[in-house]
Image (tube, rainbow, N blue to C red):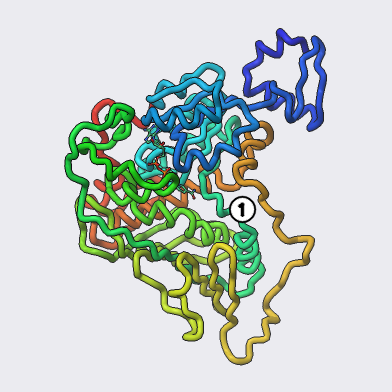
Amino acid sequence: MTRRSTQAMPRRQFLKSSLAAGAGMMILPGGFVSGANAPSNKLNIALIGVWGRGARHWHAIKGENVVALCDVNQQHLDKAAAEFPKAKHYVDWRQCLDHPGLDAVLICTLDHTHAFITNWAMLRGLHVYCEKPLANTVAEARLVRETYLKNKHKIATQVGTQRHAYPNFNRVREWIRDGAIGELKDVKAWGNRQLRKPGYLPDAGKPPKHLNWDLWLGPSPYHPYNPGYVNGKPGLNCLNWNMYWDFGSGQVGDMGSHTMDIAWWAIDGDRPTSATAKGDAFNPEVTPVELTTTFKLPANDWRGPISVSWLQGGAMPHSPRNFVDLNKIGHGALFKGTRGFIVADFNNRLLLPLGKDTDMSYYNRRAKEQMLEPLGDFQGEWINAAKGDLQTTCNFDYGGTMIEMMLLGLVAYRAETEIAYDGATGKTDSAKADQYLTGNYRDGWNLVG
Ligand SMILES: NC(=O)c1ccc[n+]([C@@H]2O[C@H](COP(=O)([O-])OP(=O)(O)OC[C@H]3O[C@@H](n4cnc5c(N)ncnc54)[C@H](O)[C@@H]3O)[C@@H](O)[C@H]2O)c1
């Protein structure tokens, strides 16, 4: 292989071929140097949404070629430029995605833009890491997953649910799979965050010059500028906008993405066949704080059908034993089986066998050497996958079906009725509910582009 022929090969294909040739350093004819750390083996990455959560990913991509930075706030671009001085700046992600030679994008923008940027990026053959939640509507979640499934032979994807790398996720999964609570019947995940807002913020006049408000809104219906949407603490500013229907899905997509992940990993979840919801009175501007959504999930190859619920904002499952105070666990999951319960949060778990004479002889505990391997570095898994076998734990199939179910709960909530759901078509049995499966977008914005 000559240097000329290497350059002629599409860059992503070259990255994979050079990695497949061996993990160590490789000198190619013509003096071209390759290998895990060689410049030629680095990903050309664009970071879209560079401040706040975006800044928490700087360390993970520092070893790659960060060639493009995109943000609607010039002051945020300036901060990131100090870290990545060689990167070209963009204000509009649609232009950023066409940066020459791009391999991958890391998306940390507002929730209502995730599916748009993600889908456009995958259609360009780019590897994508997208912050949670992956989508804002059921239809968006389905589209993103479908695009991923069509392109999974060439791209690596990861939803930003980084807590998934905590060892407890695997330990809970092992307990369930090895029968520590018998046959699984019911799962309830909950979160206690409560952010009450009356409605969209009032018009506060012109946005500052350094902020492109029109692009901040992006596909969302128009809302006047108010600094209250943008002046939160870095990495927590999402709590200033994610409860508004046009920008987010409240705690369903926020902590729901992380906490339902404990359950989703343990149950091998798939699209539900029904959904019901109850919660706060409907507010057309703000998503509910208190909410309980319940789904029926079909059987799979290792368990029967189960019920899965998400509870938030004060709604809580009943504790299986009065000496276990679930209210002391801010974000957790309760698994019920025929032989007992598991109570889990992100880092801890409790096993509660049922009945006075339980001997747990039914529990087929796996040997140490059969325990699931640690995931390791979460962002690193995606970067390595993009250069290698494309395999990630929270890819857009896994994360896509989970957020599709979670968002379907909001559809049932808005329709105020139990709905039957067909995962194959993405339709419910209610015309009223079907209208809430998709979003309202401003003219000129398209999920496919
Ligand atoms: N995985 C986690 O633990 C975690 C933690 C916090 C936030 N998040 C997620 O990260 C995302 C960002 O949250 P945040 O609190 O950093 O929000 P933020 O409001 O601070 O926005 C992040 C950055 O994106 C920029 N931005 C906004 N719209 C943009 C657009 N259309 N194009 C380019 N840049 C744009 C902002 O100017 C800012 O620099 C949210 O989706 C949130 O759910 C994830």
Q: Residue, x 35% and y 69% (percent of image)?
A: 314
Ligand 1 lies in quarter:
top left
- Rendered location of residue 310, percent (x, y): 40, 63
43 sits left or right of 36 in the view: left
Q: Residue, x 20% and y 55% (percent of image)?
A: 198
The residue to which callout 1 is attached is: 165
**Hey, which residue is sitting farthest bottom in the picture?**
356
Q: Residue, x 56% and y 18% (percent of image)?
A: 101
Q: What element carries label 1?
A: helix
Inspect the image, locate mark 1, and give the three-letter code of the amino acid beneath it. Ala
How many residues crowd around disc 1 within 10 Å: few (fewer than 14), some, or many (20 or more)?
A: some
286 and 328: which is toward the camera: 328
- Rendered location of residue 326, percent (x, y): 46, 75
306 sits left or right of 167 in the view: left
Q: Residue, x 47% and y 36% (percent of image)?
A: 107
194 and 52: which is toward the camera: 52
Q: Quadrant of the N terminus?
A: top right
- Rendered location of residue 302, percent (x, y): 60, 62
Q: Is residue 408 visible?
A: yes
199 and 276: which is toward the camera: 199
- Rendered location of residue 227, percent (x, y): 27, 41
Q: Can residue 120 be seen in this view?
A: no
